[in-house]
Structures are given as C-alpha cells and as structure tokens.
Amino acid sequence: MYAPPVQRLITELSKLPGVGGRTAQRLAFHLLRASEEEALALADAIREVKERIGLCEVCFNLADGPRCRICSDERRDRDVICVVEEPSDVISIERTHEFRGRYHVLGGALSPIDGVDPEDLHINELVGRVSANGVREVVIATNSTTTGEATALHIAAGLRERTPDVTVTRLASGLPVGSDLEYADEVTLGKAFAGRRSL
Ligand SMILES: [Zn+2]
C-alpha cells in the first residue's frame, strides 16, 4: 500500500510501546510533512542517546560515562541501597526526595514464563556490592506486581543467606497492588518509602 520506505517507518514506529498501527501511520505522515531539519533532529536524538548513554558500571542506572550521576555524587549515603527494576524507577523515587542512598537497577523482574531467570538480572552484582561495602540496609523497591514480589522474595532470601547482618526492607503497602512504580504519584511513593518494613 505504501512505498517501502514509508512502510518501514510505520513498522518501526508501531514497535514503540503504546503505539498501534493507526498511531504509527499518523506519526509517519507527520514526519513526512515536517521539514527535513525537524525530522532529522528526531533521528539524531535517537542516534545520540544510543551512542552516548550506557549503563553505570556500579548500579546499572543509565549513565553518560562509566558511572551514573548518583554513584558519582559523594554526598549520597553508601550504606543504604535501593533496589529497583528499571532506570525509570530511579527517577520516580528521586522525585519523592525521601531517599539519600544509592541505587541498584536489576534490569527487569524474575519471570520464568518469559524466560527471565536470576542470572538475567543484576542480582549477583547486588550481592557483591552488599557484601563488599559496609552496607547497612537494602530497600527492595521492585514493583508490586506478581513478578516484582517474586523478585523481592528471591533477593531477600539470597541476602539473608549471604549477608545476614544487613537489614532488608520492602516499601510499605499503600502502593496499588499489581502496579508499576512509575505510575505511583510522588506522595504515595514517598509514604511507602518512609514506612518501609523489614522483610
Ligand atoms: Zn550508578
């Protein structure tokens, strides 16, 4: 129906989350109408983010160098580590201003059905960090979904075995069950953080 380059653009756009076939088509026609400069600015922004942004060598948050902004900040407490699923969760928690420690980004949640096993996440690196550096508390802030809860229990069990002196806590309930952290409002997430409990 379309010239192959147009079809290719529609196909690529429709792979984006929340973009169905009709939206992809609308976006493609918007880009075709836009000036060359405007359209290529989008292409360049995508290229630059893929070239310049990688993962922090310590916590696996997004970083534009070897270490992320938080791991490079000497004012952040080293003795508390907050464990999250994705880099976007770091942003959600930072917005609450409740947390002054450091993070560890797992890169997902355990889901055997989807083929996500412990070795696919940055769990070993977490255990390594916790055993190495005088960490006092690990706050597990995975999503309150089935996979997020399973991940929290798996990590808590591993830490209890390997680093029994470290307190492991979980965000307080009050977060909507079955929901992702990134959709929680700041006040709710802040309260869940302040009221975290031992696991
Ligand atoms: Zn980092």
Image: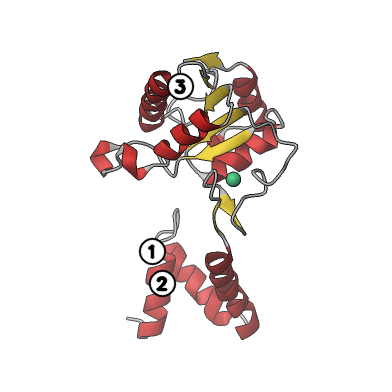
Question: Looking at the image, which residue is at 44% across and 44% down?
Answer: 107
Q: Is residue 131 above or below residue 104?
A: above
**Sequence-wise first label, 2 or 3:** 2
The percent coordinates of residue 124 (x first, y second) are 40, 37
Nearer to us of marks 2 and 1 is: 2
**Sequence-wise first label, 1 or 3:** 1
- Numbered label tally: 3
Name the residue type under label 3.
Answer: Thr
Outermost residue, right direction? Answer: 75
Which of 86 and 126 lies nearest the eye of the viewer? 126
The percent coordinates of residue 93 (x first, y second) are 62, 35
- Disc 1 crowd, CA 10 A, few/some/many (<14, 14-19, 20+): few
Q: Which residue is mark 3?
A: 163
Question: Looking at the image, which residue is at 64% across and 78% down?
Answer: 38
Which corner quadrant of the figure contains ligand 1? top right
Outermost residue, front direction? Answer: 132
Alpha carbon distance from label 2 to label 1? 8 Å
The label number, if any, that marks residue 10 in the structure image: 2
Question: Dot 2: what SS?
Answer: helix
The percent coordinates of residue 198 (x first, y second) are 51, 13
Which of 111 and 157 lies nearest the eye of the viewer? 157
Alpha carbon distance from label 2 to label 3? 50 Å
Q: Which residue is mark 1?
A: 21
Pointers 2 and 1 in contact (C-beta within 8 Å): yes
